[in-house]
């Protein structure tokens, strides 16, 4: 892949389509990296043979994928109706039980010490179980990214997950996040207006933005503000008054469990003046006014462009994309086709200039290695989380900051460490969905199993507790929070199905043999071409070749073929540790 | 300057306004500049730690003006009664869990700067935070103010000068010349390699400038990574402290470890990250907890510095991107507001109240406190008054009168 494209730099800013004569295998590889998650040389050759028009159309106008090719999510079955509506905090749950005798489908004990303990246990059970199940949903999704014959469907779902961002930490219900993901998978390449309406009615988003608290007479502005600022128009295109009026239109929008509801008695039916329009608008009316704004089409198409092509976007080009998007009635597929076929997309300013996101880095690494399952070691969520992008955990409603902010000096090192963990799986790996890494939880568990009572088992080491937060933990007599936290983990780990911890099946010796590379230098050049977008300098090639010579004791691959697997893996680790490996 | 009631603040205000009126440098300011120079030459090792509270901390429920009935009128449900506060004078009390702040205040080491904000405030977390991080309200800047400060303090960009405790780099530390060290978990800040690979990994590519800017950026980072990782890891593994920082150290324990190891860094940036303080709904318990953690962490940090004998060298400045609206909302929470209190903590800080108290009744059209102190005045105070850098106007792109906050 590491080639300098034949493209001319005056393609930059040019939205006219690239011609069949201009199409090269390098461009096919670039298209597959950006519209999907990269691929093997065979995947690239297939797209290259199609020509640009067909290659782009095959990705954009994909056939629906059936459940035999990609199985549905395999539920652990951790939810029960008693959990609804889930209280907003542990104190809310135990207060409710104190008042009514039950909460979360669990009754308080009639008498005795720690009457409310089972309620507190159940509260933490659901928090932990939902977290663990969300990690399984993330694995399921990562496997779809890796294996789907329609990679752009998953790529767009990833885009929308960063755009209409919600995180499990606040929503605390894997089912709502799974529902949101399905929305992005099914509607993510459809119509933007319809998608926005669906998101505004999505229980996950309603929960994430506290929409349920937005009631007539006392609008909570969070929801309306984020819809305008982050989801559609961008900041600076509306006033504070528009935010307040918009919030009134969404009053009464709420959810019950997994269903969207409008509480008519909480909805403000009065006239609202929003972006110059006056009427008795509801949320959909507001969204339709938002869609009329040129700011909306420019903002959203610009963000899609940045995601697929490159970070810097010329305002004139953005205006053109915005006009095309709005005139096309916010249909997403034609916009994607326009961007992905444009000469601009294949210009030197776009090719090989993007720093891959952690998810892209992980999945494309697996793709290029030819894997057909996301390895269980290293843990996908742990690895991508350390690199700064964990699925279902965007840091804020603004999603993940893109571009250069993906990388810091420390994260550059971590990316190399990720490659090593894939190529040399740690035999001391401990599955984070089976084992608890919190020292205090482990300590409680050990003491309880040794026969200690709850007070003794949960006591903090007596000395040096001067911080107020550590003092406060043991105060309530009705239940013990530390014990509940431990019990919650225990119950959750019992119920949530384990993630398969199979390691990557990699055969680099076979790959080298199949390619017919005969010398160590050919192997180095071959690895760089297959795995890297932007080639490192000659000094690096020489250093890598010297390294491989030293490890094999020869420059002759045939002579080393029976023992070269480990040296080849080290070589690939070194390749993947190069700064240039981060680019696509 | 330890126990200033509101009356004293009013007196202060008169003074400050007189100072602000003249565009020319007053004798007071010149004297200040001379002191700043002296401080710089006397102590080239002064360290500034900036602590960001992201999400818009509700300042009115942090430093509660219990002496003002208007506070309870605006917040009949979430207003905190005097009995549950940690009162510090006859007008103010800290939120009940803020034992550490109370102690620091009573020891004269904590300054409260009232009414900090900027004109035409943004109510967007991200926009307003970007304004604070770049010190460029209603404009923004490609570089952060702490990054520009590092560039001004050390134009040759020596390594390991600017540290950001975070999973991702903050805009505040983005610099033209410096590559900030950014890490969350020091144990992860390391190149894991087999012994056979180490020689090949130790060398950094010796490229001449390359045409692809993203590639150039990565090559620069690779160089910085090699320089810093060993230093950070060793600092962390050598650090042992008996001090209790509470349930969330906000990264300050890691800052302490770096300082303990005599890291050359003079600027640190840490955060209570991820919009933690965005308390729209039923904020009471949650907000109290967030403040308790913050107060515990800052107090623990100050104790730790004292233990190491470095308390005289460090000042902590604490801010949030905006406060909350004065009246509570109907969800027992508060919505995005404007002016807010900032805090400055340190052994050398002259504790007490600074800035003019914003009125709780004369609000702007959106029921927000009107700002009385441009937040960049506090930045200027850190730059000139604490770090002894004469270049605050260039860094902040404007003249901002500093407070006489340091002993």
Image (cartoon, helix red, strand yellow):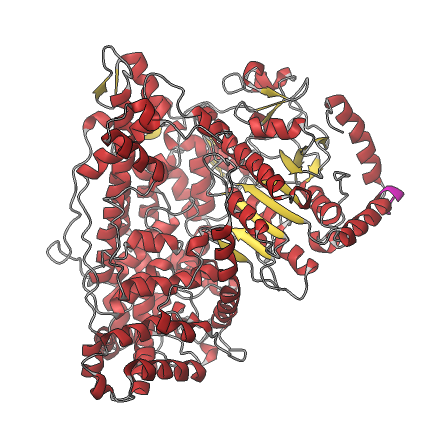
Q: Height in image: A512 above or below B379?
A: below
- The quadrant where residue B61 appears: top right
Q: Main secondary structure of the magenta part?
A: loop
Magenta stretch holds residue A560: no
The reply, left or right, for residue B217 in relation to residue B119 is left
Q: Quadrant of residue B174?
A: bottom right
Quadrant occupied by the C terminus of chain A: bottom left
Q: Choose between A288 and A279: the one closer to the eye.
A: A288
Q: Quadrant of the N terminus of chain A?
A: bottom left
On screen, residue A15 versus residue B260, left or right, reads: left
Report whether A428 appears left or right of B192.
Answer: left
The residue shown at (60%, 30%) is B101
The image position of residue B264, as x and y in percent, is 62, 57
Q: Position of residue A198 (x, y in %)?
A: 30, 42
Which residue is outermost to the top? A111
On the image, which quarter does residue A521 sit in? bottom left
Please give the range of residues in magenta.
Answer: B24-28
- Above or below, A387 against B403 in this view is below
Q: Residue A229: in sight, yes or no?
A: yes
> Up-down: is B187 above or below A215?
below
Classify A515 as above or below B65.
below
Nearer-the-camera pick, B403 or B39: B39
Seen from the viewer's position, the closer of residues B177 and A217 is: B177
- Where residue A203 appears, as percent x and y from the top left, is 30, 36
């Amino acid at each position: 892949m590491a080639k300098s494209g034949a493209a001319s730099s005056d393609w930059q800013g040019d939205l006219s389509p690239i011609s069949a004569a201009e199409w090269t295998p390098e461009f096919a590889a670039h298209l597959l990296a950006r519209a999907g998650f990269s691929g093997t040389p065979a995947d690239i050759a297939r797209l290259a043979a199609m020509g640009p028009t067909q290659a782009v159309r095959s990705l954009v106008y994909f056939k629906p994928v059936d459940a035999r090719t990609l199985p549905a999510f395999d539920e652990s079955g951790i939810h029960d109706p008693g959990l609804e509506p889930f209280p907003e905090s542990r104190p809310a749950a135990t207060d409710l039980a104190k008042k009514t005798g039950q909460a979360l489908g669990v009754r308080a004990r009639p008498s005795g010490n720690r009457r409310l303990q089972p309620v507190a246990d159940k509260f933490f059970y659901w928090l932990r179980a939902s977290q663990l199940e969300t990690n399984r949903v993330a694995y399921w999704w990562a496997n779809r990214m890796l294996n789907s014959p329609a990679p752009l469907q998953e790529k767009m779902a990833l885009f929308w997950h960063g755009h209409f961002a919600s995180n499990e930490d606040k929503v605390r219900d894997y089912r709502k996040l799974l529902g949101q993901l399905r929305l992005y998978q099914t509607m993510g390449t459809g119509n933007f207006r319809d998608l926005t309406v669906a998101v505004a009615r999505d229980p996950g988003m309603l929960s994430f933005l506290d929409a349920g608290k937005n009631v007539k007479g006392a609008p909570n502005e969070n929801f309306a503000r984020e819809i305008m600022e982050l989801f559609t128009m961008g900041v600076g295109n509306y006033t504070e008054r528009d935010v307040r009026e918009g919030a009134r239109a969404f009053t009464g929008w709420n959810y019950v469990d997994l269903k969207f509801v409008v509480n008519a008695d909480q909805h403000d039916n009065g006239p609202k003046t929003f972006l110059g329009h006056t009427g008795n608008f509801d949320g959909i009316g507001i969204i339709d006014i938002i869609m009329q704004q040129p700011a909306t089409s420019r903002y959203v198409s610009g963000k899609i462009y940045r995601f697929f092509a490159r970070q810097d976007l010329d305002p004139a080009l953005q205006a053109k994309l915005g006009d095309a998007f709005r005139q096309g009635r916010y249909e997403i597929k034609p916009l994607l086709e326009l961007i992905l076929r444009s000469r601009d997309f294949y210009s030197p300013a776009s090719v090989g200039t993007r720093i891959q996101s952690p998810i892209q880095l992980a999945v494309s690494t697996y793709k290029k290695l030819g894997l057909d399952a996301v390895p269980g070691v290293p843990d996908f969520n742990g690895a991508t989380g350390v690199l700064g992008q964990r699925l279902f955990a965007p840091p804020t409603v603004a999603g993940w900051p893109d571009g250069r902010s993906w990388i810091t000096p420390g994260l550059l090192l971590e990316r190399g460490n990720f490659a090593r963990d894939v190529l040399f799986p740690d035999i001391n790996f401990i599955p984070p969905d089976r084992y608890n890494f919190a020292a205090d939880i482990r300590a409680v568990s050990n003491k309880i199993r040794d026969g200690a009572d709850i007070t003794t088992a949960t006591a903090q080491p007596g000395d040096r507790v001067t911080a107020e937060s550590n003092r406060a933990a043991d105060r309530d007599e009705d239940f013990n929070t530390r014990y509940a936290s431990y019990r919650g983990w225990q119950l959750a780990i019992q119920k949530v199905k384990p993630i398969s911890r199979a390691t990557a099946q990699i055969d680099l010796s076979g790959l080298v043999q199949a390619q017919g590379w005969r010398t160590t230098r050919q192997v180095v050049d071959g690895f760089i071409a297959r795995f890297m977008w932007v080639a490192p300098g000659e000094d690096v090639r020489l250093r890598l070749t010297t390294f491989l010579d030293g490890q094999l004791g020869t420059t002759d691959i045939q002579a080393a073929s029976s023992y070269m697997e480990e040296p080849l893996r080290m070589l690939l680790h070194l390749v993947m540790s190069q700064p240039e490996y981060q680019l696509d | 300057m330890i126990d200033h009631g509101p009356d004293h603040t009013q007196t202060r205000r008169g003074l400050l306004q007189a100072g602000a009126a003249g565009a020319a440098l007053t004798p007071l300011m010149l004297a200040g500049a001379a002191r700043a120079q002296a401080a710089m030459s006397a102590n080239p090792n002064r360290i500034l730690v900036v602590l960001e509270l992201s999400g818009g901390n509700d300042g009115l429920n942090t430093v509660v003006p219990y002496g003002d009935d208007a506070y309870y009128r605006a917040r009949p449900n979430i207003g905190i009664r005097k009995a549950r506060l940690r009162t510090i004078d006859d007008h103010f009390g800290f939120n009940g869990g803020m034992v550490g702040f109370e102690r620091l205040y009573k020891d004269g080491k904590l300054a409260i700067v009232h009414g900090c904000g900027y004109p035409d405030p943004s109510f967007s977390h991200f926009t307003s935070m970007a304004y604070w991080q770049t010190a460029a309200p209603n404009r923004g800047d490609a570089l952060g103010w702490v990054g520009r400060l590092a560039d001004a303090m050390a134009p040759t960009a020596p390594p390991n000068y600017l540290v950001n405790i975070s999973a991702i780099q903050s805009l505040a530390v983005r610099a033209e010349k410096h590559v900030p060290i950014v890490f969350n978990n020091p144990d992860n800040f390391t190149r894991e390699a087999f012994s056979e690979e180490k020689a090949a990994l130790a060398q950094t590519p010796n490229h001449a400038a390359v045409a692809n800017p993203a590639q150039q950026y990565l090559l620069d980072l690779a160089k910085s990574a090699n320089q810093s990782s060993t230093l950070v890891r060793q600092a962390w593994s050598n650090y042992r402290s008996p001090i209790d920082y509470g349930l969330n150290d906000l990264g300050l324990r890691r800052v302490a470890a770096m300082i303990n190891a005599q890291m050359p860094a003079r600027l640190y940036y840490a955060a209570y990250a991820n919009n933690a303080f965005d308390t729209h709904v039923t904020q009471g318990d949650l907000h109290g907890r967030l403040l308790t953690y913050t107060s515990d962490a800052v107090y623990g940090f100050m104790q730790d510095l004292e233990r190491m004998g470095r308390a005289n060298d460090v000042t902590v400045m604490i801010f949030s991107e905006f406060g909350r609206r004065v009246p509570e909302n109907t969800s027992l929470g508060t919505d995005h507001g404007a002016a807010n209190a900032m805090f400055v903590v340190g052994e050398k800080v002259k504790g007490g109240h600074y800035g003019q108290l914003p009125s709780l009744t004369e609000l702007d059209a959106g029921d927000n406190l009107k700002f009385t102190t441009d937040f960049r005045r506090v930045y200027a105070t850190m730059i000139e008054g604490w770090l002894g850098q004469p270049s605050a106007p260039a860094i902040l792109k404007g003249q901002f009168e500093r407070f006489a906050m340091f002993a």
